[in-house]
Image (cartoon, rainbow, N blue to C red):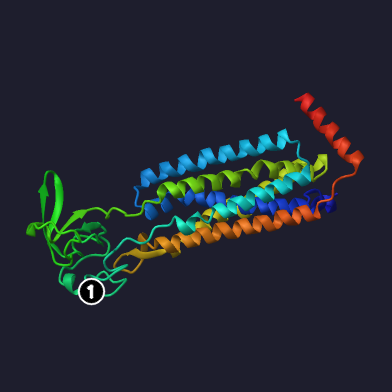
Amino acid sequence: RYANFPRQILLKNPVLMSLIIASSSEALVATGFATFLPKFIENQFGKTSSFSATLGGLVLIPAAALGQIISGTLVSKFKMDCKTIIKFMIGTCSVALLLNTVFLFAKCGNEPFAGVSETYNGTGTLYNLRAPCNANCRCLHSMYYPVCGRDEVQYFSPCFAGCASHIFNNMKKTYHNCSCIGKPKKENGLEDFLYEAVPGKCPTQCKLLPLFLTFFFFAVVFTFMAVTPTTVAILRCVPDKQRSFALGVQSVFLRLLGTIPGPILFGVAIDNSCTLWDTNECKTKGACWVYDNERMAYLLMGISAACKIITIIFVVMAICLYKPPPANAALSQKDSEMASAIHT
């Protein structure tokens, strides 16, 4: 009785397992971006965390729903058989792979950050917040309070910018007598403002957010256009009595290979793009203050592209291994589906 259990859970069905692994690879990408897309938008395009989360939701949720509706409609309207459905999945995954190249041309460069991406007016070294201009200020690495200098360079805090005083002008706080801040790139002729900084990060000069969101929206649409066909193909490539087992096996693999490792893998990739960590006196790492935008874009694009390629490979394997059922079996399956529809 128990000897037939492995056969019942269908692990020996190569077409089924190929489709399950393909869908798990897609689930890994979907859950990874669902978790970290807001963080990518926030750091890449200089938006606030709340606005980035809103944009992420406005892109992911409608695109995912639209993709499943379109694919379900097409499969039903054209009455696709199992082999045609698998071919349809290859097409949607290939288009999604091409659209993922948006990370290559819609990425933003790193904004100037003193002590991280550039030196303090030619003094100090990279990846070192301390320089001769702030050596006597006793600044703390744990006090992250970014300021934007008039030289359009971001500084870790007013202390690391060498600012000695601040004033409130029209309820706005500004810093003066900053020894580390150079001359402004746009001269205004006012001596009082030559060495000034304002709280907050410097505004990004990157204007590629609309382009990125447009391409990414359609990438999500084509990604989720494979969800409904995958489920239909799985149900059609197994005997009627084992369909519930097939869906159960798919659910297990989706979690083991997709939804669980997805956020972990994306999180590791984003951590690897960090260039400035919050460290306390014991040298223990905390949150990341500054990311390398280009490295982050390349890493996320690499993970997504690798998963898409894995998906395409296993879907191609499924179509090569698939053998259409005999005509009488296909007719019996069709009658079973019609009877099921009448009873429901």
Q: Can residue 267 be seen in this view?
A: no
Q: Residues within 10 Å of mark 1 (few under 14, many from 20)?
A: few
Image quadrant assignment for residue 68: top right
Q: In this view of the protein, which residue sits in the foreground, 99 or 56?
A: 99
Q: What residue is at 32 percent from the left and 69 percent from the top?
A: 282
Q: Residue 65 at what x, y percent from top left?
A: 57, 37
Q: To which residue does mark 1 refer? A: 122
Q: Is residue 186 visible?
A: yes
Under tag 1, what secondary structure?
A: loop
Image quadrant assignment for residue 171: top left
Q: Is residue 201 left or right of residue 265?
A: left
Q: Quadrant of the C terminus?
A: top right
Q: In this view of the protein, which residue sits in the foreground, 1 or 14?
A: 14
Q: What residue is at 41 percent from the left and 44 percent from the top?
A: 53
Figure disc tally: 1
Q: What residue is at 76 percent from the left and 53 percent from the top?
A: 318
Q: In this view, does 11 lie to the left or right of 165?
A: right
Q: Is residue 340 left or right of residue 135?
A: right
Q: In this view of the protein, which residue sits in the foreground, 235 or 149?
A: 149
- Under mark 1, the amino acid is Gly
Image quadrant assignment for residue 178: bottom left
Q: Residue 271 at what x, y percent from top left?
A: 44, 62
Residue extending furthest right? 328
Q: Residue 205 at what x, y percent from top left?
A: 32, 55
Q: In this view, does 144 lie to the left or right of 39?
A: left
Q: Residue 294 at what x, y percent from top left?
A: 42, 62
